[in-house]
């Protein structure tokens, strides 16, 4: 479901792999199961926080007891969800974590006549709907979530492709060019040799 929403998802099958990926990859958010094989999620989370990993983390717990949720939050989790859960709620909580990280209260971004709803990737320009591909929406979402800050091509590439892929270095420039054609040339600024940015909405 997260991939269908245009998100890039890396999957760790156990706590050892999770600890490694969370420490070396630059993720926007992490969904961490407490009951992982080989190493439990709480010890992984504590290690990340001790290493200075500030990525927002949502923990999943199979137990409904309040003490495990408290332990998770005290270990550095930003949110929690108890199993079983609805995928729509997980997706909404991830969006909320990303907004908090970006200092954005609303899931809807608006700048220069462009309105982008991060819940559905619905985009309009001066009230008229615009169709974006999943990759275009991912680039736009990342730039809006980091509005006011310069984002390099490498950073964009790392956040819209899985960690084990090797995309062509020009693909980000292609997506930005397409976005400018669809949304107007002035929305995304280029800082030559450094990257892209959208001004504060």
Image: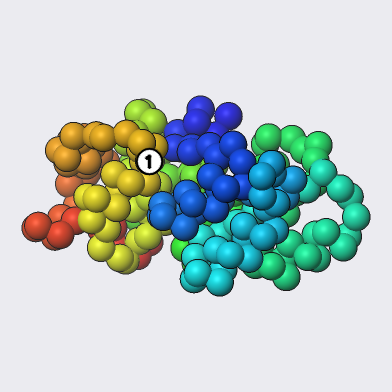
Left/right placement of residue 36 relative to residue 31 reads right
Q: As displayed, is residue 100 above or below residue 140?
A: below
Q: Which residue is drawn at 90% across and 55% down?
A: 65
Q: As displayed, is residue 4 above or below residue 186?
A: above
From the top left corner, tell me how far across and down residue 145 is, in percent: 42, 56
* Residue farthest along the left direction in this orientation: 192
In this rendered view, identify the residue nearer to me: 21 or 174. Answer: 21
From the top left corner, tell me how far across and down residue 67 is, in percent: 87, 63
* Residue farthest along the right direction in this orientation: 65
Quadrant for the N terminus, please: top right
Query: According to the image, label 1 marks what residue?
Result: 163
For mark 1, give the secondary structure.
loop
Quadrant for the C terminus, please: bottom left
Left/right placement of residue 17 relative to residue 197 reads right
Residue 14: quarter of image: top right
From the top left corner, tell me how far across and down residue 92 is, in percent: 63, 45
Left/right placement of residue 91 relative to residue 73 reads left
In this rendered view, identify the residue nearer to me: 14 or 105. Answer: 14
- Label 1 crowd (10 A; few <14 / some 14-19 / many >=20): some
């Amino acid at each position: 479901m997260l991939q269908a929403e245009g998100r890039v998802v890396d999957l760790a099958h156990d706590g050892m792999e999770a600890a490694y990926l969370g420490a070396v990859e630059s993720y926007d958010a992490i969904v961490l199961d407490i009951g992982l094989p080989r190493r439990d999620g709480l010890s992984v989370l504590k290690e990340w926080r001790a290493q200075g990993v500030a990525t927002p983390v949502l923990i999943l717990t199979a137990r409904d007891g309040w003490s495990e949720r408290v332990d998770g939050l005290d270990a550095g989790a930003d949110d929690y969800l108890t199993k079983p859960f609805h995928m729509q709620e997980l997706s909404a909580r991830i969006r909320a974590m990303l907004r908090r990280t970006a200092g954005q209260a609303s899931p809807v971004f608006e700048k220069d006549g462009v309105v982008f709803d991060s819940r559905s990737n619905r985009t309009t320009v001066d009230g008229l709907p615009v169709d974006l591909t999943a990759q275009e929406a991912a680039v736009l979402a990342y730039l809006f979530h980091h509005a006011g800050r310069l984002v390099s091509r490498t950073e964009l590439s790392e956040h819209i492709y899985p960690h084990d892929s090797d995309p062509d270095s020009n693909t980000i420039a292609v997506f930005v060019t397409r976005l400018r054609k669809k949304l107007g040339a002035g929305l995304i600024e280029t800082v030559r040799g450094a990257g892209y940015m959208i001004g504060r909405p």
